[in-house]
Amino acid sequence: MAVPKKRTSRSRKGMRRSHDHVAVPNVVYCECGEPTLPHRACSVCGNYKGRQVVSGDNA
C-alpha cells in the first residue's frame, strides 16, 4: 500500500484545497426590494425582468 514519505505542509495542503470552497450565490434585488437569485422570478411579487410572470398571491 502506498504511504506518503514526507508530511504535506499546511501551505501545500491549502493550495490543493483552494478550489474546494463553496461558491457564494449571487443576489440581485427585485423591484419590490426582496433579494432573489438571478434569472428567476421573484418569489414574493412574481416579477421577472419588469413584468408579471407569476401571480403574486401564490408565488
Image (cartoon, helix red, strand yellow):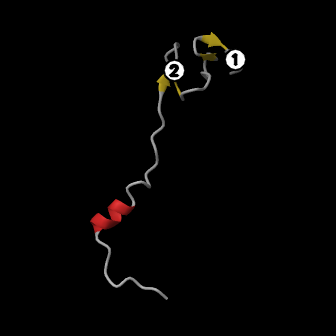
Camera-nearest label, 2 or 1: 1
Pick the residue in front: 11 or 34: 11
Residue 8 placed where, x, y %? 32, 74
Specify whether 57 is left or right of 39. right
Q: Secondary structure at mark 1?
A: loop
Numbered mark located on residue 54 in the image: 1
Q: Is residue 4 above or below residue 58?
A: below
Tell me the quarter of the picture where residue 43 sits.
top right
Specify whether 9 is left or right of 45. left
Specify whether 55 is left or right of 36. right
Pick the residue in front: 13 or 57: 13
Residue plotted at (31% across, 81% down): 6
Q: Amino acid at mark 2?
A: Glu
Numbered mark located on residue 27 in the image: none
Pick the residue in front: 1 or 24: 1
Residue 59 placed where, x, y %? 68, 21
Specify whether 54 is left or right of 42. right
Q: Is residue 21 above or below residue 5?
A: above
Q: Is residue 50 above or below residue 21?
A: above
- Local crowd size for mark 2, using a 10 Å CA cut-off: few (<14), some (14–19), many (≥20): few
Tell me the quarter of the picture where residue 56 sits.
top right
Q: Amino acid at mark 1?
A: Val
Residue 20 placed where, x, y %? 44, 55
- Local crowd size for mark 1, using a 10 Å CA cut-off: few (<14), some (14–19), many (≥20): some
- Say which label, 2 or 1, has the lower sequence index: 2
Q: CA distance from mark 2 to mark 1?
A: 15 Å
The residue to which callout 2 is attached is 34
